Image (tube, rainbow, N blue to C red):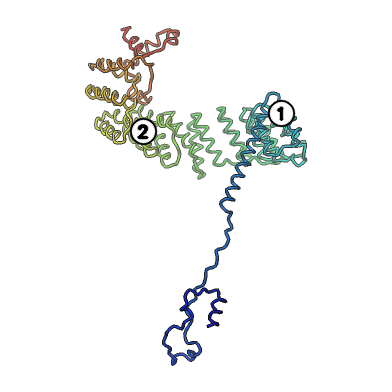
Amino acid sequence: MAFLEKLAVDSGACISSPFFLKQPAVPQLRHLSTRGWAFPSPLPPLCVAKRPPPLPTELPVDEERQQQRSFLVDAFHQRRCLKAFLSELSRSGSNPLCILDRDGDWPSDKLWPALTFLANSGRANEALQVFSLWKSKEVSRTNVANCSKIIRLFCEGNLMDAAMSVFEDMHKHDIAPSVTIYNAVIHGFARNAEFQKSRALLSRMMGDGLKPAPETYNGMLRAFGRCGLYDDMSKCVKMMESEGCYPNEVTYNLLISEFARGGLVQRMEKAYRTLLSKRMNLQSCTLITMLEAYVDLGILEKMEKMFRRFLNSEAFMKDDLIRKMANVYIENVRFARLEEFGNDIAGRTGRTELVWCILLLSSAGMMSRRGMDSLLCEMERAEVSFNTTFMNIFALFYLKMKDFKALDGVFSQANKQGAKLDLVTVSILFDACAIGYNGSYVLEKWKRNAFLESAVDMKTDPLVISAFGKGAFIRKCEKLYASLRSKAKDEKFWTYSDLIRLAFSRN
């Protein structure tokens, strides 16, 4: 018994029950074991205590929070000190050189904000003086990295005289400018349309044994395009290829974009074909620029081809371009295709107000009452608000159909939902009265709610005017308004009552 107790203690076991010390009543089969007499029965399994878990290597929560708090406090203190420092520099009559002498030296996280502030404040000469004094405090500070940083700072601010001062100072100290520094200075002069200096620096770069990168030429091409120098762009590409620096994907996208903005469709398409032949990617912004070029020129077939490519891309189209495309369909009387276009846009953006407008105009242009009724039901289910544009589209459609009963319903619904009226709404009323509609009840309501005394305004989407044209009332008002003297136009605060009196006082 003592032997078993000692065994349990030595093995780290815990005795959970006194029955552990008793012999279990298990029948012995001596004829099957020659050692059964020495070991009458096996020991029952020991209950081994679990080892304590290892100590956590992570910091306790309280200590971690303390470190985070300390970090935030230090960051806040640094920002406050930097704000006070820049405030001192911005004071009238402040001298950065005296402040640097007083402080003895500035660390990098204090120097570069100061130089940026001075450069952006039009104090480039002071920034140069501070940089020179700061460099003189340690010889190792006169290096390519620091010179590159300040040159790029000056070039981004179009401070080319200051940038060239540092650039020439590098040669005096036998520091060879890098390709990055040359690119910054070449692009800076190009942005200022100083192309002779850009070309001279490009030649100097090659004379120093540096090979221009595609980015070197891309900056010049971008500047040529902004200035409308498209022939110079073509010459620049030829010079680029002659020097063994072949255009890359960025170059071709840049050429396509600049030719598209200039309306040079043939050059744009040539660059586009070259890009495709080289299996390069067309950037999303370039795709939109090409699409917009076709839209501006009204080339419907190519516009649709590029739009299909847009649908297969992840590019984003702004509302202005959507309106311009819809206007092309309207001008070409392609209202069925306008409906498809609206649904395609809805698949990307959902049914926005602009999409609802396009869908309503497509049905109205096809004179489809069923289409208009169907869209009205969909708008009610979607709980779309009855705004000025939607109200005027329905009113113009029923006016075109000469359905005065439905027109009454539109005016009544607009009054119930509090839709804001505008010049197009007034024009619809008087154009309808001209062909037999009795609008006295509607006009009386407008008088009672003082709408006619409000300022003349146009809230309707321009696409509505493109689809239906200007009404007879608006055309008459424009003609009479144009005949007035400029003084009468400017001094008068025009209300709808004034416009109505103007339209009917000169019959």
Mark 2 or 1, closer to the camera: 1
User: How many numbered tags mark residues here?
Assistant: 2
Q: Which residue is mark 1?
A: 126
Mark 1, other Cα within 10 Å: few <14 / some 14–19 / many ≥20: some
Disc 2 secondary structure class: helix
The amino acid pointed to by label 1 is Glu
Q: Nearer the viewer, residue 472 or 108?
A: 108
Q: Nearer the viewer, residue 330 or 314?
A: 314
Res. 394 mark = none
Figure check: 140 above or below 390: below
Q: Which residue is mark 2?
A: 355
Residue 182 visible in the snapshot: yes
Disc 1 secondary structure class: helix
Q: Nearer the viewer, residue 103 or 26?
A: 26
Q: Residue at x 39, y 13 (%)?
A: 494
Spatial CA distance of label 2 from label 1 is 55 Å
Q: Quadrant of residue 200?
A: top right
Q: Residue at x 45, y 11 (%)?
A: 490
Question: Residue 192 location, x and y as percent?
Answer: 62, 28
Question: Residue 266 location, x and y as percent?
Answer: 48, 33
Q: Residue furthest front?
A: 18
Answer left or right for 487 relative to 115: left
